[in-house]
Amino acid sequence: MYQIDQKKAQHPIFKNYLPIAEGIAKTVGSHCEVVVHDLTDISSSIVAIFNGHVTDREVGSPITDLGLAILRKGAEEDLLLNYPNKSIKGKKIKSSSIVIRDNDGKIVGCLCINIDLTLLSLATSVMNELVNVQEEKEDELFPQTVADLEDRMIERAIEKIGKPIGLMNKIERMEFIHLLDEMGLFLIKGTIQNIAELLDVSKFTIYNYIEKKT
């Protein structure tokens, strides 16, 4: 959706900005409003507006407060980029303004880009919730075999103890067994025998370590 003031659009300077404005609007999409302003006519400054539904403006709408400030104080820079805005209806908007000057360097207009971030912000919120994880929890294991699952759980328990099995003392070995028990490893048939062989102890020693915790 777009509107163009056909009379003002014939201005030799503004005419050059119309295809640029249209190109930006069509490239970014319907949530992006692009406006060409004639700052020499503050009561009806809009020369052309593409996707005017973003701010609910149309050809004939007046200059903005920023435009007035630019005229009043001048512009130190011709690019005013990515500043926050809000529409009358409360839409969250990101704006950029590009000052348009004539051949003498006098400010005659500006090209303004207003992107409605409302839906994007909602989408970002949803995405953040989807990817949010409790950092204190460990990554879930996705083993291909029971043996792989057992190996991964043993590795995880060793990491928590902080030293290889061969260097663990009795207390650390008991803690190692308790960690594996908490992980649920011993719910898998045959794992107590496997861990007993790994520690070079009997199955009864493993059972004893588990019972001591309870």
Image: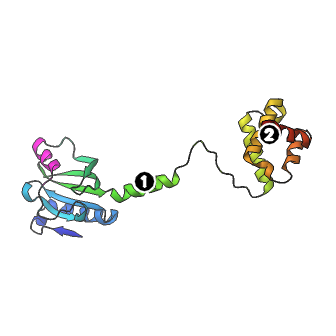
Helix, strand, or loop for circle 2?
helix
Report the side of 8 relative to 188 (left or right): left
Question: What percent of the width, then of the height, locates residue 120?
Answer: 38, 57
Marking on residue 81 = none
Q: Quadrant of residue 189?
A: bottom right
Does residue 61 show up? yes
Question: What percent of the width, then of the height, locates residue 28?
Answer: 33, 62
Q: Quadrant of residue 135?
A: top right
Based on the picture, tell me whether residue 27 belongs to the magenta stretch.
Answer: no
Q: Nearer the viewer, residue 81 or 189?
A: 189
In this rendering, is residue 201 above or below 68? above
- Secondary structure mostly seen in the magenta stretch: helix
Does residue 41 show up? no
Question: What residue is rendered at 25% in x and 47% in y?
Answer: 79
Q: Quadrant of residue 35?
A: bottom left
| Distance from Cα at disc 2 to Cα at disc 1 | 42 Å
Q: Which residue is mark 2?
A: 177
In this rendering, is residue 101 above or below 35? above
How packed mark 1 is, by other alpha carbons closer than 10 Å (few <14, some 14-19, many 20 or more), is few
**Sequence-wise, which precedes: disc 2 or disc 1?**
1
Q: Which residue is mark 1?
A: 125
Q: Nearer the viewer, mark 2 or mark 1?
A: 2
The N terminus appears in which quarter of the rendering?
A: bottom left
Q: Which residues are magenta?
A: 63-73
- Mark 1: which amino acid? Ser
Question: What residue is rendered at 86% in x and 52% in y?
Answer: 190
Question: What percent of the width, then of the height, locates residue 165?
Answer: 82, 36
Question: What percent of the width, then of the height, locates residue 93?
Answer: 28, 54
